[in-house]
Each structure stands twice: as structure tokens, then as C-alpha cells.
Image (cartoon, rainbow, N blue to C red):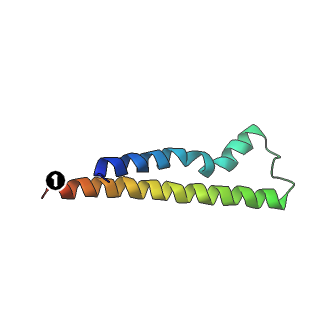
Amino acid sequence: MTGKTIRLAGAAILILSVVPAGGPVYLGIIRDDVHAHSRLGDLGLQAITVSGLALMVLGLFLLLKGGRAEGSSGSR
């Protein structure tokens, strides 16, 4: 894969991960009592948030790796 492809994949993952990472914020704005009465619902939202944050980290990692891959191949 080229550096540009890696950067594009990283950017796409980073953009798409905003929705699950901000899930509780969106649900809190839309409907505040969605998870307020359920421990399972609260744990589910926490799991979604953690997975969204992990995807954000992966996307950022790929963006940085794509930049390094392109920079190193240009110096050869």
C-alpha cells in the first residue's frame, strides 16, 4: 500500500469513528433517559464509546504512518 492509500484509510477511519466515540453525547442531546434506568444500557454505551476512541487512535496512527511511509520512500 502506498502512503497516500494508508493516509486515506486512516482519515476515513478517523472520521467514521466520531459517531461511536460521541455516542453518549448524541444520545444525551436527543434523549436523556435512554440509558439512565438500565445498567446494561449504560455499560453498552461505555463499550461503544471505548471502541470509538480505539478506532480514532487507529485512524490517527494510520495517518501518521502514511505520512512517514511517503516521506521515507521519497528520500530513496
**Residue type beneath disc 1:** Gly
The residue that appears at 60% across and 59% down in the rendered structure is 51
Task: Report x, y in % for residue 32.
Answer: 79, 44
Nearest the eye: 6 or 49: 6
Q: Which residue is mark 1?
A: 74
Whether residue 10 sits left or right of residue 73 in the image: it is right
**For residue 46, above or below residue 4:** below
Count the marks: how many?
1
Element at badge 1? helix
Which residue is at the front of the view, 51 or 2? 2
Residue at left offset 16%, top offset 53%: 74
Give residue 30's position: percent from left, percent from top.
Answer: 74, 38
Q: Relative to residue 35, is residue 22 drawn left or right?
A: left
* Residue 45 at x, y percent in the picture: 71, 55
- Residue 27, percent from left and from top: 72, 44
Residue at 74 percent across and 58 percent down: it is 44
